Image: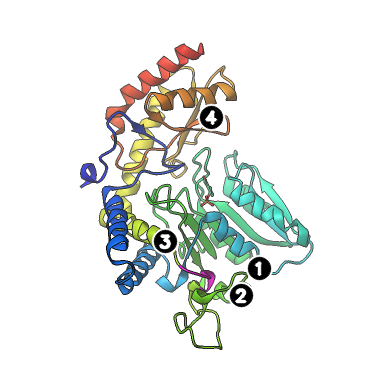
Amino acid sequence: MIPEEFPLDPNLIYWNHAAIGTWPRRTRDAVCAFADESMRQGARNYPAWISRESRLRMRAARLMGAGSADDIALVKNTSEGLSLLAYGLTWQPGDRIVIARGEFPSNRIVWESLACYGVCVDSVELGCDEPEEALLGAICERTRLLSISSVQYATGLRLDVSRIGRACRERGVLFCIDAIQHLGMLRFDVQQNMADVAVADGHKWLLGPEGLALMYVRPSLRNRLRLRQFGWHMVEHAGDFERRDWEPAHTARRFEPGSPNMLGIHALEASLSLFEEMGMDLVEDKVLHAARQLVAWIQSHADWELCSMDAEGRLSGIVSFRIRGADGRMHARLVNMALARGLVCAYRAGAIRLSPHFYCQVTEQLEKADGVIHHVRRELGI
Ligand SMILES: Cc1ncc(COP(=O)(O)O)c(C=O)c1O
């Protein structure tokens, strides 16, 4: 099944799923079929589109460990989901939020934007032996929320989110997970993690398009979040256009004001079907196997320095490294030049970030990747 689903250009080594993932064949087929149908029949079969949307919500609920599809909102992106939470809560001057230092900007800027309400952000350094302890240690009496990417975007550091979630619940602190670097890569379970909110866009490890994100909101929090966007689609009786009275939908659809991203829904539903067929146990095993291969490869080079933690439970599908003696600018140039030679990876936080997915043939690709990097280093004189 895997090779047929990923007929990638054979000249490419695509180790960049932490930025934007490839699409499986079935996703491309779903988009083509949707385009064809729209061209020939318009929305004549709209009920079938709605069924596709329901299927996506059900798949998302299973993938995230949510109790029900009603707990899933389909939002534009991770940043929008985080903003729905930030501006859905009511803040008091002096309230505090704990985040990680070195977080992706989406999971920092939104919290900093609450400064207008007198909210303060405490940023915690995670580069220590016990990052969970460090995060929990920053919680004080005024802390209302802890928000974290369960897998850090630059280093791939994987956090023990169930431990953080349990501690937050015990201390009455809301717990929000940015799962964009986790969902589709590793097993995930919002209930086990005791998350109040979890959100992930579909274009990275979920192998879908940009612009459609899965957002879980814990049922007991759903009605407590103040709504900031309104429209025909977020009401309980959506579609009954003559009706004058309205109330927000009882489900997480209340966070979706207008027409859905039906093209994205068709695509992401197809992508998620692949994860369900494979099973996340197998996906996780394969991703971690690929990551371990990359760690061993990096460690086999005397002047390469691994930036990711490779301990069991810390390693994820994101592995980053630096070349000793080269500065950030050189690393950025190296990544650009490697791209031109078919090695697709990214420059993040001063390092080269590699992020292969479960289908990547890392064993067969290592020799070529090695050749590309050595060639580029010679050209750059590093
Ligand atoms: C941890 C993390 N959060 C959020 C984002 C951005 O998400 P979106 O574009 O869905 O808002 C990224 C993208 O790289 C990311 O790595």
**Secondary structure type for disc 2:** loop
| Residue 258 covered by magenta stretch | yes
* Circle nearer the N terminus (3, 2): 3
Q: CA distance from mark 2 to mark 4?
A: 41 Å
- The number of discs equals 4
Report how far apart the C-alphas of labels 2 and 1 lie in the structure: 7 Å
- Determine whether the beta carbon of the residue marked 2 sits less than 8 angstroms from the nearest atom of ligand 1: no
Residue 48 left/right relative to 185: left
For label 4, the residue is: 351
Quadrant hosting residue 86: bottom right
Kindly identify which residue carries mark 1: 89
Circle 3 is placed at which residue position? 64
Badge 2 or badge 1: first in the primary sequence: 1
Do tag 3 and tag 1 residues touch (Cβ < 8 Å)? no
- Work out whether 158 lies above or below 94: above
| Secondary structure beneath label 4 | strand
Q: Residues within 10 Å of mark 1 (few under 14, many from 20)?
A: some
- Tell me which residue sits at (38%, 36%) in the image: 291
Estimate the x, y position of residue 42 in percent, counting from the top left. Answer: 32, 66
Within the image, what quadrant is residue 268 found in?
bottom left
Identify which amino acid the numbered label 1 is placed on: Leu
Cα distance between the residues tagged 3 and 1:
23 Å
Determine the main secondary structure of the stretch shown in magenta: loop
Question: Tag 1, which secondary structure?
Answer: loop
Height in image: 329 above or below 189?
above
Residue 139 appears in the figure: no
Disc 2 marks a residue whose amino acid type is Arg
Q: Position of residue 17 (x, y in %)?
A: 41, 41
Above/below status of 290 relative to 376: below
Q: What segment is highlighted magenta in the picture? A: 254-259
- Between the C-alphas of marks 4 and 3, the distance is 30 Å
The residue depicted at 53 percent of the width and 70 percent of the height is 257
